[in-house]
Amino acid sequence: MAQNKITVVINTLNEQKNIARAIESVKWADEILVCDMQSDDDTALIARKMGAVVIFHKRMGFVEPARNFAISKASHEWVLIVDADEEIPDSLAKYLQEMVQKPIVSTFVEIPRQNIIFNKWMKASMWWPDYNIRFFKKEAVTWSDHIHRPPKTEGQGLTLPGEERWAIIHHNYTSVSQFIDRLNRYSTIQAKELKQSGTEFKWTDLLTKPIEEFLGRFFANRGFDDGLHGLILSLLQAFSFLVVYIKLWELNGFKEDQIKLSEVRIETDKIGQQINYWFNFQSLSKNPLRRVIQKARAKLK
């Protein structure tokens, strides 16, 4: 295993529209390793023509198992994970190349990610800085076999500043149809994981889980700062939670359950109170007196 050299790992499945852009942005790397999950298109052919080493993994519903496999095949000490719909800017590439040539104690690096969704860079509602562990020593990071879990790490981490020049550019959802297709695939996996973990279906989750996700993104994480994009994406994320819990109900055999309107009233009243809280909070946050009080409290700490 060569020290001070970098292997870029790209996992793919039917990414012929994106793979050339991703590879072009990492041509500076010492090795580009594309792990293809039996694509039906020309992803592997394009990658090989562009000089990447292409290996294969069986098709999975999510990337984590194939990612661990690809990392194990990397030839060099340092590994950079890049998704096929991402690209590495020159400023970040230069930083990483210089980093591995210096004596460092860090074994992994958290890198911000610039999510471009529906043609807009999303800067609020939990989409920025969207830190991901993407650069690391080969033996220091391992992904779980569960979907969307942070990886297990060993050693000391480094977090890059949340600035555009250090951010991976992520050409995320380009259409609503793409969002729905991915939502359908991921929600099935997430529902199965909930059932395997012993989570019991409760009809109240159909109301509380989506609204909590919406309020968290749109209000607590200021999705409204992204305008209509922020509202729509907060609603779509909330909808994804609704689908997960409906699929959990499906896994329980569509079990019948009687629901009283009085119970629905209680839950919706709670939701109304949460919505009112956030509207009031945002109104108060614009109050100059509130800012003065906050500054005074900060000085006393």
Image (cartoon, grey):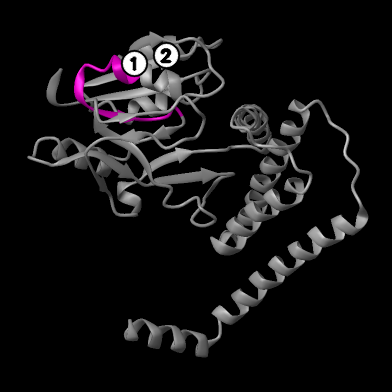
Q: Look at the image and give the residue range highlighted in magenta.
A: 70-84
> Is disc 2 in contact with disc 1, using a CB cutoff of under 8 Å?
yes
Residue drawn at (80%, 65%) of the image: 269
How far across and how far down the image is residue 6, in percent? 21, 26
Q: Nearer the viewer, residue 95 or 149?
A: 149
| Circle 2 residue | 46
Cα distance, mark 2 to mark 1?
Answer: 6 Å
Tell me the crowding category of disc 1: few under 14, some 14 to 19, or many 20 or more residues within 10 angstroms, Cα based. Answer: some
Q: Nearer the viewer, residue 268 or 284?
A: 268
Q: Is residue 281 above or below residue 90?
A: below
Q: In which quarter of the image is residue 286?
A: bottom right
Q: Quadrant of residue 95?
A: top left
Q: Nearer the viewer, residue 46 or 15?
A: 15
Please state, as top left, top right, bottom left or bottom right, where the N terminus lies in the image: top left
Is residue 71 rendered magenta in the image? Answer: yes
**Mark linked to residue 50:** 1
